[in-house]
Amino acid sequence: MGMGRVCKVNSIPSSSGGSSSSNPSTPSLTTSTSLTETVNGSHQFKITGYSLSKGLGIGKYIASDTFNVGGYAWAIYFYSDGKSLEDNAGYVSLFIALASEGTDVRALFELTLLDQSGKERHKVHSHFGRTLESGPYTLKYRGSMWGYKRFFKRTSLETSDYLKDDCLSVHCSVGVVKSHTEGPRIYSIPVPPSDIGQHFGKLLESGKGTDVNFVVDEETFAAHKLVLAARSPVFRAQLFGPMKDQNTQCIKIEDMEAPVFKALLHYIYWDALPDMQELTGLTTKWASTLMAQHLLAAADRYGLERLRLLCESKLCDDVAINTVATTLALAEQHHCFPLKSVCLKFVAMPENLRAVMQADGFEYLKESCPAVLTELLEYVARVGEHSVAICRHETMLDGSDVNGRRVKQRI
């Protein structure tokens, strides 16, 4: 995020009639600084199937996903048939809207329709890089917008380089204005981040002081009971509870592969995920995904909630045609609801559904989690019904705000 700032220094004026060294009663000088700056962020919104959006209706829009800048959620609204009746669908409209609760949110905006010919002749409307006579634009409440009713004449747009393969690409920048006051900083001592994980990790690597052994697939792993008990409620019960294992010299772990248990120990000591490719000896994304799936199951088995969420996050990032079915089954079995939702949405997309159903993992999904198929059908139906987001919103003046302030266009 970029920062722009305006500073104002306030001070107590010194008394006339000499310096403080000659007059002990003279008050000491104190200072403070008022900082006004912008917290900047941007979002790119790709609109595919533009021709299918025509006829949606005047005042109805296609919405981007929400994105966060400066502590607020924002969304881009594209009106393919225009926002107002008086334009008679002759223009497309483009707006940026405050999508979260907020009052008098001051911000700078930029809306850019990207030239897709490579000539970089983008259509830009911007507050940035110039002086605003009336200052930043103020959004009064959730749903308030800034933008252009007559952003582009529709007949011109459809023969321009902005439309390619029935697709438009919009880039939006938001700079939320923030202000605060700072007093003097007398000193600053840098504090390094915690390295406790490094110390425990090196303890595991050294093998010193180990007092428990685990056998996994005929491979032995030495560890420290107190470390395991501190990190996992399951290990704590197994090693120190009323039903603890009597023979800690050799505890056998069933239903888990050695590399997975090694990764589990790595997390317990280092408090971080291991290098999946180094652990598996394979460089493919599929191998890393498979390891993350097994590690998520292990994390759930031993009550390691943060590790489970780390694995969920990685699997969300790596969702793909050939692995999404097994990931969905895993999410269902281990109650990973955010991951399950991501997988269902991915599979339900028309361009993915057929390929996923032909993948090997889909048979496993049908056999192990038949109830998920019902939910999948509901997602598929929902995608078909709501492929285009339709809403109504407040009317605004073309290229201006409620106070009549206009934003000059750059080409």
Image (spheres, rainbow, N blue to C red):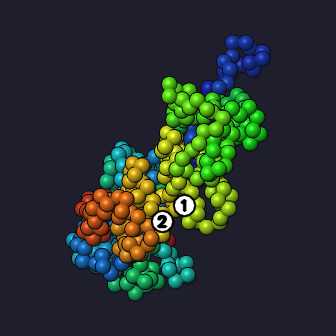
Three-letter residue code for mark 2: Thr
Residue 331 at x, y percent in the picture: 42, 54
* Other residues around mark 2 within 10 Å, as few (<14) / some (14–19) / many (≥20): many
Q: Residue at x 59, y 42 (%)?
A: 252
Cβ atoms under marks 2 and 1 closer than 8 Å? yes
Residue 138 at x, y percent in the picture: 39, 50
Which of these two is toward me, 165 or 207?
207
- Counting residues from the start of the chain, the first of labels 2 and 1 encountered is 1
Which of these two is toward me, 198 or 90?
198
Does 11 sit above or below residue 343? above
Q: Residue at x 50, y 80 (%)?
A: 116
Three-letter residue code for mark 1: Thr
Which of these two is toward me, 169 or 396?
169
In the structure shown, which secondary structural element does the residue marked by tag 1 occupy?
A: helix
In the structure shown, which secondary structural element does the residue marked by tag 2 occupy?
A: loop
Does 194 sit above or below residue 370? above
* Quarter assignment of residue 387: bottom left
Using the rendered image of the protein, determine whether residue 112 is visible from the camera's viewpoint: no
Does 16 sit above or below residue 195? above
Q: Which residue is mark 1?
A: 289
Q: Which residue is mark 2?
A: 323
- The residues tagged by marks 2 and 1 sit, at their Cα atoms, a distance apart of 8 Å
* Other residues around mark 1 within 10 Å, as few (<14) / some (14–19) / many (≥20): many
In the rendered view, does 63 fall on the left or right side of 25? Answer: left
Point out which mark residue 40 bears.
Answer: none
Q: Residue at x 52, y 83 (%)?
A: 117
Residue 40 at x, y percent in the picture: 53, 54
Q: Residue at x 31, y 63 (%)?
A: 373
